[in-house]
Amino acid sequence: MFSHAPGAIAKTTAAIAVAMSIYHIYTGAFGALEALLHRSIHLAFTFALVFLMYPFSKEGRQRWLDFLLMGLSLGCVFYIFWQYDYFITRYPYVHPLTRTDLILGGLFTLLLLEAARRSIGWAMPITALVFIVYAYVGPSLPGLLRHAGVPTETIIDQLYMTTEGVFGIPLGVSSTYVILFVIFGAFLEKSGTGQLFMDLAAATTGKARGGPGKIAVHSARCPARLILPCMLTTKWWSSSLRATRAKSSNSSPRRPRDSGSGA
């Protein structure tokens, strides 16, 4: 995973990933911190990994920019720890934001969009920007799209200062449940268990006509986090792989959260 990075950066990235895994395994076993703290720690780990694993330049130049953005993003999250009592005792949308809140909240939003762009492409950042712009230009829009407009302070208040924006339910699910399944799947994948499931499916249907598709149907009984990396070695087109997997997983929505048609 880290082979594309220089030695020191690869070791640092691996250390952060291990620390993140240990933290989430511990909280999964003994209980998580309060919601805002737990989600902030999860996001801080994610920020660090994204800016280290997805550099600004594919050639590895301008790494200073990656470290700068990582430091700024961690600083925005650290502010939540530093001012935690202030965050949990203020009345959202009632107490006015300080200048520091506005600056860090705006910077945090931009850094989050950049992290999303680096890791999953332009679709998510553009979608988020469309809705943010819509909050501003609502008074200028016609018909049903028109609204009174949302002030900058209110947008930052919701996105950064409460558990209704970035630190809301999706991040809570990711930091509490999804991450444990990802770690579990990674352990099983590296131990060879995922390949074992593929071998069992291939042994029963691999020689039949349409064997790879039948393997996908049988393997749909297993978590997607285990099976998809192994299925990629069959050299299918990714669209065919995902379509077959999604269709065959319609029967498994009651299985772990990364099974079912949502996988």
Image (cartoon, rainbow, N blue to C red):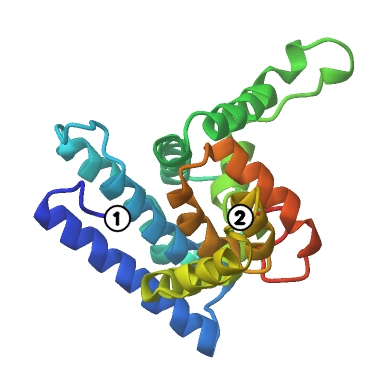
Question: Which residue extends farthest bottom?
Answer: 30
Residue sitting at x 64%, y 39%: 154
**Residue 146, image quadrant:** top right
- Nearer the observer, 41 or 22: 22
On screen, 44 above or below 135?
below
Q: Earlier in the sequence, mark 1 or mark 2?
A: 1
Whether residue 93 is visible here, answered yes or no, is no
Q: Nearer the viewer, mark 1 or mark 2?
A: 1
What x and y, as percent, mark residue 242? 62, 44
What x and y, as percent, mark residue 8? 11, 56
In the picture, measured across the screen, residue 15 lies left or right of residue 219, that is left
Residue sitting at x 68%, y 23%: 134
In the picture, measured across the screen, residue 118 lies left or right of residue 217, that is left
Q: How many marks?
A: 2
What x and y, as percent, mark residue 41? 43, 65
Amino acid type at image mark 2? Thr
On screen, 158 above or below 188?
above
Please give the label number shown on residue 162.
2
For the residue labelled by badge 2, is the local secondary structure a helix, a strand or a loop? loop
For the residue labelled by badge 1, is the local secondary structure a helix, a strand or a loop? loop
What x and y, as percent, mark residue 34? 56, 75
Residue sitting at x 16%, y 39%: 64
Looking at the figure, which quarter contains the N terminus?
A: bottom left
Per the image, the residue denoted by label 1 is 1
